[in-house]
Amino acid sequence: MTANDALTGLFISFEGIDGSGKSTQAHLLADHLRAQGREVVLTREPGGSPGAEEIRALVLQGDPNRWSAETEILLFTAARRDHLERTIRPALAAGKVVICDRFADSTRMYQGLSRGDLRQTVDTLHDLMIGVEPDLTILIDMNPKKGLSRALSRQTAEERFEGFGEVLQTKMRAGFLALAEEFADRFVVIDGGRSVEDVAVDVVQALG
Ligand code: ADP
Ligand code: TYD
């Protein structure tokens, strides 16, 4: 039994390395479901509520070593808690589909794996403060070099993690694939190294 059980909507997350096509596919899925008459809330992390968007700037901009790994876990979890309270839970309670561009699996990877093994800390804090998993997680799997070049071509100020380079992206890719096996009941892995249209067909199919 998950903490989602009291909520009537459908909670879908997109995960994958930077530049894998998550936001592109999340938008297309939202359009597809809206065309079918579903009410959809398309949101993202870090962010998705006014308070969490403020935290987003703190964690994504500036020096890559701006925060300790532990502080970073607290900041991402604080943002998620606000997002859950203000955006996700109300939408699910109203029976809407919530499509979230990244969720707790990103913290399990980026904060749990990138600077030593802090996965247990991430999970403990998650159980205490969040306690919700998506009904479906779509992992867009992608070659790290290709993902990074796509991500860097966007040229935004939010490059703290892209700044760690291809080594981190490679580790994250392997970590995400392992996570998909760990949570096989909710993960679907899709090959992101194809055309936008081909990936989108598989995304719709993943909904069953
Ligand atoms: P993410 O949200 O995973 O970082 P985006 O959806 O923002 O990825 O895509 C990163 C960049 O790659 C964008 O410029 C986007 O237009 C482009 N892109 C997304 N999917 C594809 C694809 N299947 N083939 C080629 N380019 C893509
Ligand atoms: P995002 O805007 O999805 O970046 P991208 O489109 O490049 O994939 O996410 C921004 C960055 O935040 C990304 O590098 C991953 C990182 N991140 C974490 O480190 N921990 C988290 O919990 C989340 C949600 C994101």
Image (cartoon, grey):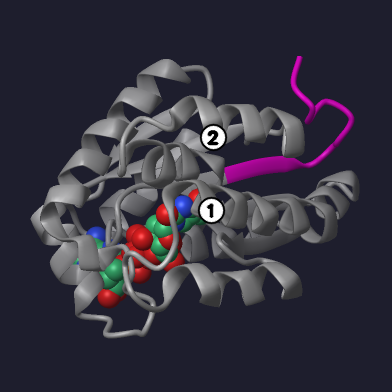
- Looking at the image, residue 180 sits to the left or right of residue 151; the answer is right
Residue 166, image quadrant: bottom left
- Read off the magenta span: 1-12
Is residue 11 depicted above or below 123 in this figure? below
Displayed-image quarter of ligand 2: bottom left
**Which amino acid lies under the numbered mark 1 shown in the image of this protein?**
Thr
| Disc sitting over residue 132 in the figure | none
Three-letter amino acid code at the position of disc 2: Val
Camera sees residue 135: yes
Q: Which residue is mark 1?
A: 71
Answer above or below: position of 58 versus 37: below
Q: Position of residue 116 (x, y in %)?
A: 31, 35
Q: Quadrant of the N terminus?
A: top right
Residue 109, x across and y down, in percent = 39, 39
Q: Residues within 10 Å of mark 1 (few under 14, many from 20)?
A: few
| Residue 23 appearing in the image | no
Identify residue for label 2. 122
Mark 1 vs mark 2: in front: 1
Q: Position of residue 107 (x, y in %)?
A: 48, 44
**Which secondary structure class fits the magenta region best?**
loop
